Image: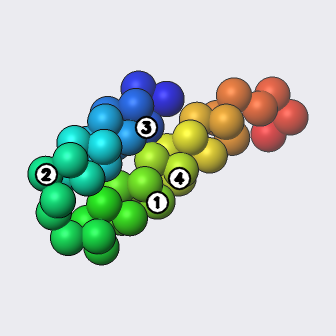
Amino acid sequence: MGLAGLLIGGAISFRRQELPKALIISFWVLAGMALLAAYLLTLTDI
């Protein structure tokens, strides 16, 4: 979840710097994937 926080912070920072939208979107997607991975790792039924 810490990685997701860093990626979200990077996406917000890049948005303020007006960098390319593809870069911003990729950071949001990676943050979502990091949150999903963190959730899956916390499941006890695996």
Q: Choose the circle earlier in sequence order: 1 or 3.
A: 3
Dividing the picture into quadrants, the one containing residue 37 is: top right
Identify the residue under disc 1. 29
> 38 or 20: nearer the eye?
20
Say few, some or many: other residues with alpha carbon within 10 Å of mark 3 (under 14 / 14 to 19 / 20 or more).
Answer: many
Q: Choose the circle earlier in sequence order: 4 or 3.
A: 3
Coordinates of residue 35 in the picture (x, y in percent)? 56, 40
Coordinates of residue 17 in the picture (x, y in percent)? 13, 51
Distance from Cα at disc 4 to Cα at disc 3? 8 Å
Dividing the picture into quadrants, the one containing residue 27 is: bottom left
- Give the residue type at disc 4: Met
Distance from Cα at disc 2 to Cα at disc 4? 24 Å
Identify the residue under disc 4. 33
Q: Is residue 32 left or right of residue 3?
A: right
Say few, some or many: other residues with alpha carbon within 10 Å of mark 1 (under 14 / 14 to 19 / 20 or more).
Answer: some
Q: Is residue 35 visible?
A: yes
Decide: marks 1, 3 in contact (CB < 8 A)? no
Distance from Cα at disc 1 to Cα at disc 3? 10 Å
Q: Choose the circle earlier in sequence order: 2 or 3.
A: 3
- Give the residue type at disc 3: Ala
Q: Choose the circle earlier in sequence order: 2 or 4.
A: 2
The nearer-to-camera label among 1 and 4 is: 1
